[in-house]
Each structure stands twice: as C-alpha cells, then as structure tokens.
Amino acid sequence: MSFSQNHISSYKDIKHRCSYRTQEQSSKQMEGVRNQQVILKDYVNGFPKESDMLLKTSSITPFKLPQGSNAVLVKNLHLSCDPYMRGRMSKNQGSYVDSFTPGSPIVGYGVSKVVDSGHSNFKKDDLTWGGTGWEEYSFIPNPDTLFKIQDTDVPLSYYTGILGMPGMTAYIGFHEICAPKKGEYVFVSAASGAVGQLVGQFAKLTGCYVVGSAGTKEKVELLKNKFGFDEAFNYKEEHDLNAALKRYFPQGIDIYFENVGGKMLEAVLLNMRLNGRISVCGMISQYNLEEGEGVKNLFCLINQRIRMQGFIAVDHYHLYSKYVEMVIPLIKEGKICYVEDIAEGLESAPAALVGLFSGKNVGKQVVVVARE
Amino acid sequence: MSFSQNHISSYKDIKHRCSYRTQEQSSKQMEGVRNQQVILKDYVNGFPKESDMLLKTSSITPFKLPQGSNAVLVKNLHLSCDPYMRGRMSKNQGSYVDSFTPGSPIVGYGVSKVVDSGHSNFKKDDLTWGGTGWEEYSFIPNPDTLFKIQDTDVPLSYYTGILGMPGMTAYIGFHEICAPKKGEYVFVSAASGAVGQLVGQFAKLTGCYVVGSAGTKEKVELLKNKFGFDEAFNYKEEHDLNAALKRYFPQGIDIYFENVGGKMLEAVLLNMRLNGRISVCGMISQYNLEEGEGVKNLFCLINQRIRMQGFIAVDHYHLYSKYVEMVIPLIKEGKICYVEDIAEGLESAPAALVGLFSGKNVGKQVVVVARE
C-alpha cells in the first residue's frame, strides 16, 4: 500500500520492461512487440484467488492497426481494480456487464496512451481513460467509449479513480440519486474505498454530517483524519451493527450510500429517517457467496417512506464534463484528496484485484503497468 | 362475501339496532346512548384471532359535545378493515402509526355521519370519511383529519375503499411513485384486494400490460373477468414463483406494485427490467411473522437500475381532490369497478379483520355498522 503522494516506491519491474521495449523499438513493426497479459483461467466460484489468473506473454505482430481500421492501439499505463469486476469472473450471473472470457485477458477501466489511431477523435500520444485490457498494449475496436484526457496537471492514475468511473459513481450516487441537503445525516459503508472516500468528502462539502464504516483501524483513522468524516467505525469490531448505528446516528440516517449489502443494509434500514434515500452502488459483502444473504427489515421502506435506488455510473457519463469541472478545481485547491493504493507492475495485478475482496487495499486500488 | 352491487344481503342486526336506538331517541341526551365497541384485549403476537378482540357495550352520557368543544360526535356507518392495522395490534413495532391501546376500541378508517359538531367545517348530518373508532358512535377530537363527503351518488362504503385511503394508495403508488408509461409491463400482488384491484384497472386505463397474483381460483377469475387483468395466477399453486413470473413476463416487469413482500419480492427482483420501479405499499406476508423473512436478490437493484420506494397514502392527501375528480367519472361511466366484501354488523368486525390475513376477503373488506 502507498498513497498517491508517494506512490513512486518501486520502479524495478517497470525499468526492466522499459529497457526491453526500447531494444525492440527499431524493429517493432516488422517483428511485433511483446505483450504481457493477465489471463482469466476459468470462471470463478467463491473468493477469487491469484491462481485464477495467469500471466502470459504474447506478441502483437504487426505492431500497427490494419489499413482503414476505426480502432485505436493503446499502451496501458494504469489499470483499475474495481469490485464490480468480481461479477465478470463468474459465468452469466445476470450482471449488468458481460462475463470475462476464460483464456482471454481480464478487461476493465484503465488509463492508456494512444500508439496508433484509425479514429478521427484520437491521435498518437493522446491520453485516454476507459475500457481496456489487462495487458501492456490493447486494441480498442470501439474508441467511442474512451474519454480523451484533457487535464494532465493531476496524477494520471486519478483517471482510474476520482476522475474516472469511481468518481462518477460517487458523484451520481450521492448528488444525483440522493439529492442531499445541508445538515442531513449521511452514512457510507466501505467508506475508505475508491468511491466511499469521495462520497464522504462530497457530503462534508455539502454541509452534511457523515459517518463511515471500514474494516481496519488504519482505515477508520484515515476516514477521520484524512477525509474529514465526522465519525467512523470498524464494522468488524461491532457485534451489533444496529446498536453501532444508533450510537453514531441517535437521530437516524437521511442518506445511506450502500457499498456492502447484507447485514449492514439490514441494520441501516432500522435506522433510516423519514423520507430517507439509499443509493445502491454495490454490495461487496455478497459477491463471493454461493447464494446471497436475505435482507430483513425491508418493511422500513414503508414506515420511513424510503427511496432505494440502484444505479450504474456509466448511464450518467453525459454528466462527466460537468463533474470534472466541479471536481478538478477542488483537487487543485486541496479541498478534496484521494488516496490510492498502488500496485507496481502488471504481474502484481492478480493479487491487487483479489485483495479487494478481503479489504487489503487502502483507498483506490490501481495497478501501474507503465508510467509513460 | 358479497359484492358491492348486491351488498344489501342481511339487514337483521342492523334493523334490530336501529329500532333499539329509536326507543332511546327521545331521552338520549339525558340518559346517554348505548355504544357498542370492539375492544383490543391485549397486544397480539403471530396471527391475530377473533378472540383477541371483544365486544363491549358502554354508553355515551350525555350524548352531546361539551360546550366550546372543537370536536365532532359521529355515528359510524362503515368501517374499513385494512392490512396495515395488523401493525397497530402489536406493541411498539416502529410502525408509521401508533399501536392500538389494549382495553380501548380499535381505531381505523370509516364512513360516518355527524351527530353533533363543535367544528366550523362540519354540521349535523354531514357525511365524513377518515379516522374513527370501531364502535357505534365516536368522538373525533381533531376533525381536521376528516374529509367531508361531497358526492353521495356512489355507494357510501366506497369511501372506505376506492374513494378513501385504499384508492389514494393505488393512485399514488401507481401514478405518482411509478410514473407508468403506455405499453409497460405491470405486476400486482394481492391483486384482488382493496388496493390491487384498482392498480390493475389503473394500469389497463394507462395502456399497460398487467398481471396479478392472488390466493384462490375465485380471485384469479375475478382478476381476469371482472377487473380486466391481462393474466392472473394463484401464487399458492406455483412452486417456483420465479418460473411463474418468467412465464407471464417473458420480457420482464417494468413496474411492480408490492403488497406482499417475502418470497414474492425475491422472485420479482429477478424479473425486473432495466429502469424498473417497485412501489412498496405493503408486505402482508410478513405481518404475522415473529421475525420477517430476509429478501434475497437485492443486487438486482443495481443490475437493472431499479427504484424501490416505500410510501404511505396519507402523505399525499393534498392530491385527494385531484384523484376524486379523475376517479368518480370513471366509476359513474362504468369504466372502473370496485368489489367489496361486506360484513354486516359491528359484531362481525373482529372476524372480518382477522380474515384479511388468511385471504378470506374477496375485494375490499368493509364492516357495515349502520346504513344511515
């Protein structure tokens, strides 16, 4: 784990790979270029393990796009590890995204640099964020899904987090779905994660009272001391989540930003205030279970006239430029911070992804494949 | 059971009481008037039984309001049996309404006639609907909660149903909460009940495809042949509710009007379409359980971007006149029908109320205390 401000901790693997590429440079169009990939071996049941993935070295020959292609060829710089990817590791779970293809590279969000472009919106050396492969280089057949990065005066890795899908998730789920008002009481679970840390800070900027839950003492400290949550607690130390919530919210909860599901949701429902809103972003506690847990206390939806709404950031990407205009100044003025957990090198990607589900990461989990 | 169009099936008890009252009439202000009441003996656990209530004969002396009172004294004509009343029979269940008081009469919605009024909005012989007691006569200390009945060209009992709280519940839950569009697929559980039968008909009038579930063959027939549901099924005959829903909604459900909770909700979640809406009106399957069932499949809220919203009609009573303007012409033109299950006499009230929870009633359960 390292925070964004000091994430340049180990360049060893990167340097090695860079020099290797340099040797290939002169002859790469003829001979092709090495492309290390993270392959999903087979569909996963239960908790994913590092051994569910393997590193494979293939090559791209020729190292350019075919004539007349609309695609782009990119070099991947930063890859994003996100909890929703667990669903893609299972077969046909009726999820909102397709399953990964066993035998092929993992796919996900990433920050990339254009190597060759057949698309009029992109040219060589443009920086992008969007869907890409867990590999050194990727062909993007439909570049319309990519965002061109305009502002490089912030860490590029932020485009996997605060300036990418997780940022939009926090923004849409909190501001658009929950329509918060100053003075309201906000609870965030998985609060130190890629999304939760932002929801808490957005809530404070809106003038709300915000409490977060996380799974280690270190994360709880981070919530209080770095992100400015009013209170925070370690849910693993609470035998009675209902009692814990009553302690932190004697007056009840107006807004719950739901990242975990299961027992936490069950307890939150008992503590919601009249006209409360629950923005359902994720349910990480359920992703590795054979069968999801049943959630009690749904009758509270009626008692308290609660609106509970599931959403996915991608449906709201038309609001991305509005979001970025709001959030980049906040970053530059130091009014919002973003903690990343950086794993160095593509070979560290399987462990980084798997670590999400045991809460190993502190902050947004990023894999640095290359720095330029 | 009898339908509204032929609900004058047994006047015996009513006639008896009426003649008794007539004898008292001349001297009633001095001697007081008999007031038969349905008393809740004690808080109830599990399924309520008739024996949880008792009939008690008290008297109102003097039979008039004190000087300077703002209250009204009403004669109760029709009493409404509603599933939400189950929550009031238990102690302090964190429900949206207070518990009943053991030793005192049950309270609920009813249609009444003003006997004496200290409130400027009401005068003798006005007809009202709103909160009243399960007794022959009630003092209403805060008559601001009563609606004055303007249109008597429809059965008066309708003001406990289609023109009262259940009507508003159907209207708000379907039109305001779910914002239905023509051509959408609508599912209603407890579909022949006081609320469900209206939701189905509103859905048809909106141009939706609507399927209902109920608990007997007779009710299923009613849904299809009287209320015009496109399809209906007996949930008790379905071993696999998910499969049943897939059969009736191969394309999925846009709108679910939730009256039952539990396993039905769990199955519905698996069959919701993108951007589906679930209006949570009640969860009758859960009311008599010591501990509510857990509901699985809530992750579908995210996959399908579902909005699930609890509501209570009373929050929306400012829309009552708008609703009545819409629905009374539909009743008069025969474009909407309303089936009532009439129990005759206050003494039949405990059985009528208890019957709701085993699905004994067909249509809106009303108790006729007096006809004028």
Image: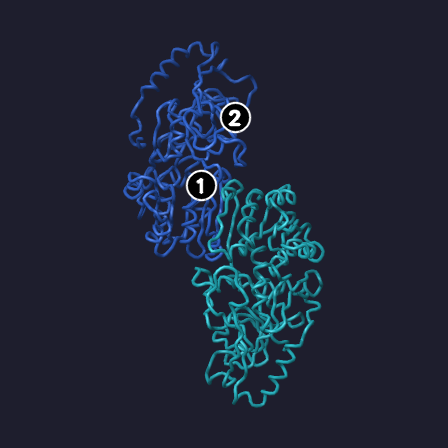
Chain colours: A cyan, B blue
Labelled disc at residue A265: none
**Number of other residues with Cα within 10 Å of mark 2, as a class: few under 14, some 14 to 19, many 20 or more:** some
Asked whether the beta carbons under mark 1 and mark 2 sit within 8 Å of each other, the answer is no
Residue hosting label 1: B283
Subunit bearing disc 1: B
Labelled disc at residue B101: 2
**Number of other residues with Cα within 10 Å of mark 1, as a class: few under 14, some 14 to 19, many 20 or more:** many
Q: Amino acid at mark 2?
A: Thr
Q: Quadrant of the C terminus of chain A?
A: bottom right
Q: Is residue B240 above or below residue B364?
A: below
Q: Residue at x 47, y 15 (%)?
A: B59
Q: Is residue A250 above or below residue B57?
A: below
Q: Amino acid at mark 1?
A: Met
Percent across and percent down for residue B102 are 51, 24
At mark 1, the secondary structure is loop
Q: Quadrant of residue A338?
A: bottom right
- Taking depth in this image into account, of B134 and A136 the one nearest to the observer is A136
Percent across and percent down for residue A109 are 55, 68
